[in-house]
Image (spheres, grey):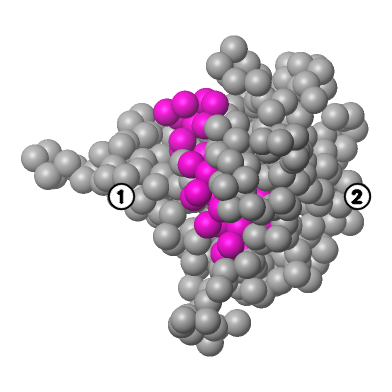
Amino acid sequence: MHKRSGGDVVQSAFSIGSAEFKNRVLVASGTFGYGDECTDAVDIAQLGGVVTKSLSMKPRDGNPPPRIVETTGGMLNSIGLANIGVHRFIAEKMPFLRTVDVTLIVNIAASTVDEYCAVLDLLEGEEGIDGYEINISCPNVKEGGLNFGTNCQMTSEITRRLRARTKRPLFIKLTPNVTHIADFARAAADEGADAVSVMNTLIGMAINARTRRPILSTVTGGLSGPAVKPVALAKVYEASRAVKIPVIGIGGITNGVDAIEFLLAGATAVQVGTANFLDPAAGVRVAREMASFCEEQKVSDMSTLVAALDARTGVSVLDSWL
Ligand code: RRO
């Protein structure tokens, strides 16, 4: 809850299954490490939640450099799922994370369905984890990643297998690199997902014309940042109209008004990603700015903004896909 002038408060807390969130801004996977790196720059207890970098069973070094490049209004990455692996996460990161009063969502990536299950099984033994975000949408790995996220049957199967193993909230993180994201949101919802996170990065590339070479070592990478926000809004709009479970909006959010736009499009909450690279406190600022916007607009409960878009003025081409 955020204090409004006059002692009132803007209601911003919400819950998904057993997970309670203090406000509607989480930090996005891959942009905030494991939640323990930026503690002098930001009080993470003021966030709605932290989503960890994707964890696989074994540690991974990721792709060779260059693996990040700035682009107009955004950035491309080809990190390649570099991470410390689930065992080191449990041993080295969980003891600290359990001491912080913040909702913790652990993101899981894998190259087989069995690996997703095995990583989740290990995390199930850990107290202090409030939910899981399942990454079926990494654009930068050969096995798993987009092969899962662009296949509706795989989306269903992964959700079904994981749902059977946990009562904790399960978010499925979807890729925008499909024609109809509504089909994937439905596949996850039908198998018992508690929410879908929309969206992961868009496949893009950058070229150095003088060397005639691609800039990233893997040629293509994942585009994020303000450049993708209009795409993300449309994907959230489409997905949220296809399912009853919450949609978590992600894509180029840098301020409170951006975040409010995602709520209006149909998101229950948002994640701030690329903006964390400029300022690790961006998420906390966005949460504060959302509350100020509500105060200014005399909105006392943020939930009233969710899917409150007034689309009377037009019919979207998306409507015919639902
Ligand atoms: O690590 C990455 O290259 C990466 C991942 Br796992 C992801 O889900 N999305 C992205 O843009 N990069």
Relative to 8, residue 246 above or below: below
122 horizontally vs 202: left or right? right
The residue lying at 81 percent from left, 49 percent from top is 15
Nearest the eye: 191 or 113? 191
Secondary structure under the numbered disc 1 in the rendered image? strand
The residue lying at 56 percent from left, 57 percent from top is 262
- Measured as percent of width and height from the top left, residue 54 is found at 63, 38
Pointer 2 with pointer 1, Cβ within 8 A: no
Relative to 215, residue 128 above or below: above
- Measured as percent of width and height from the top left, residue 43 is found at 65, 21
Residue at the spot of label 2: 167
Say if the magenta span includes residue 319: no
Residue at disc 1, CB closer than 8 Å to ligand 1: no
- Measured as percent of width and height from the top left, residue 81 is found at 54, 37
Q: In which quarter of the image is residue 52?
A: top right
- Measured as percent of width and height from the top left, residue 55 is found at 66, 35
281 horizontally vs 14: left or right? left
Q: In which quarter of the image is residue 1?
A: top right
Q: Can residue 96 be seen in this view?
A: yes
Please name the amino acid that badge 2 sits on. Answer: Lys
Label 2 Cα neighbours within 10 Å, binned few <14 / some 14-19 / many ≥20: few
Q: In which quadrant will I find the C terminus?
A: bottom right
Please name the amino acid that badge 1 sits on. Answer: Met
Label 1 Cα neighbours within 10 Å, binned few <14 / some 14-19 / many ≥20: some
Relative to 182, residue 302 above or below: above
Q: Is residue 108 visible?
A: no
Nearest the eye: 250 or 2? 2
> What are the residue bounds of the magenta stretch?
255-283
Say if the magenta span includes residue 260: yes
